[in-house]
Image (spheres, rainbow, N blue to C red):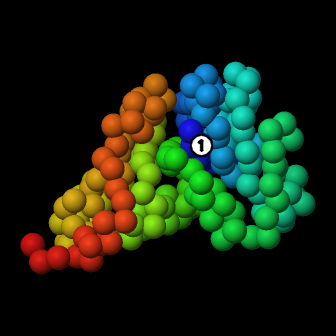
Amino acid sequence: MRVCIYASSSDYAPAAYTDDATRLGVLLAQAGCEIVYGGGSRGSMGAIADGALSAGGKVIGILPRFMADLEWGHPGLTRLELVGDMRERKHLLLTGSDAVVALPGGSGTLEELFEAITLKRLGLYANPILLLDTLGYWQPLLKFMDEQVIAQRFLNPEHRELWSRVARPEDVLPGIAAAPRWGEEARSRAAVRPA
């Protein structure tokens, strides 16, 4: 299984975030999963790679060339692919992945997550999207999605199944297995219907 990870490059967030990232990397590697992520060496991005590599895992990084020029890339990956820009990076991260796991992060993580959710809504990406909810990070967003986006009819109620939340790294693989199936038939329910 190839798991796409969206994560932060911040070294200044609470240690619980990098601790969970490291643990998730170890668990995915032990399960024989290949990780594809943004290629960075810092924050949760670096931690997930370090965790997986420490357990003998395969880790593929997708890094824009300008970030490589700034020496932001992780030096010890199984493979580091350099790409022209952020759009190409996002496309390659998602292409061929069997699941997405979003760790707490900033604007880049949020952008990647919402693109994956949008593509899934349109039936262009059918695989599980999980939010690893370290320290309850995703709770305000999930409340907003439920009480504003869905309640105000910008999404249908069944669109809650586009993503799943898990509390601990140990819950990620069971969460992927338990995620509702979603396929091209999703296009028939992508448009918002009357309540």
Q: Looking at the image, which is closer to me, 177 or 142?
A: 177
Residue 69, picture quadrant? bottom right
Residue in the picture at 22% in, 59% down: 158
Residue in the picture at 30% in, 47% down: 180
Residue 167 visible? The answer is yes
Q: Amino acid at mark 1?
A: Arg
Residue 160, picture quadrant? bottom left
Figure quadrant of the N terminus:
top right
158 relative position to 16: left or right: left
Figure quadrant of the C terminus:
bottom left
Please give the residue where the numbered disc 1 appears in the rendered image: 2
Residue in the picture at 45% in, 67% down: 124
The correct choice, above or below, for 10 with respect to 89 in the image is above
Residue 132, picture quadrant? top left
70 relative position to 123: left or right: right
98 relative position to 53: left or right: left
Q: Position of residue 87 (x, y in %)?
A: 66, 71
